[in-house]
């Protein structure tokens, strides 16, 4: 799957005034059409 790039992205302040949960909330409010994290569970599995 190929995602299209948004025309503009609003970045949160990086001066330490926001903690991770607040940065996630900022992204949800200002960049709701941008994928923030993409993860695959298969990459986290340990082979026995």
Image (cartoon, helix red, strand yellow):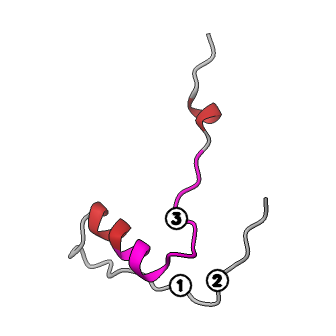
Tag 3 residue: 36
| Relative vertical location of residue 22 with respect to residue 12 in this rendering, above or below | above
Q: Quadrant of the N terminus?
A: bottom right
Residue 43 belongs to magenta span: no
Q: In the drawing, does residue 28 fall left or right of residue 1?
A: left
Q: In the drawing, does residue 17 fall left or right of residue 39?
A: left
Looking at this view, name the residue that lies furthest to the left: 17
Circle number at residue 9 = 1
Residue 31 belongs to magenta span: yes
Which label's residue is closer to the chain start, 3 or 1? Answer: 1
Q: Which residues are magenta?
A: 26-39
Q: Residues within 10 Å of mark 3 (few under 14, many from 20)?
A: few
Report how many numbered discs are placed on residues in the image: 3
Q: In the drawing, does residue 32 fall left or right of residue 38?
A: left
Which label's residue is closer to the chain start, 3 or 2? Answer: 2
Tell whether label 2 touches label 1 (CB within 8 Å).
yes
């Amino acid at each position: 799957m190929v995602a299209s790039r948004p025309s503009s992205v609003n970045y949160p302040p990086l001066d330490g005034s926001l903690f991770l949960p607040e940065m996630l909330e900022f992204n949800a409010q200002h960049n709701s059409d941008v994928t923030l994290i993409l993860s695959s569970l298969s990459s986290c599995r340990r082979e026995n």
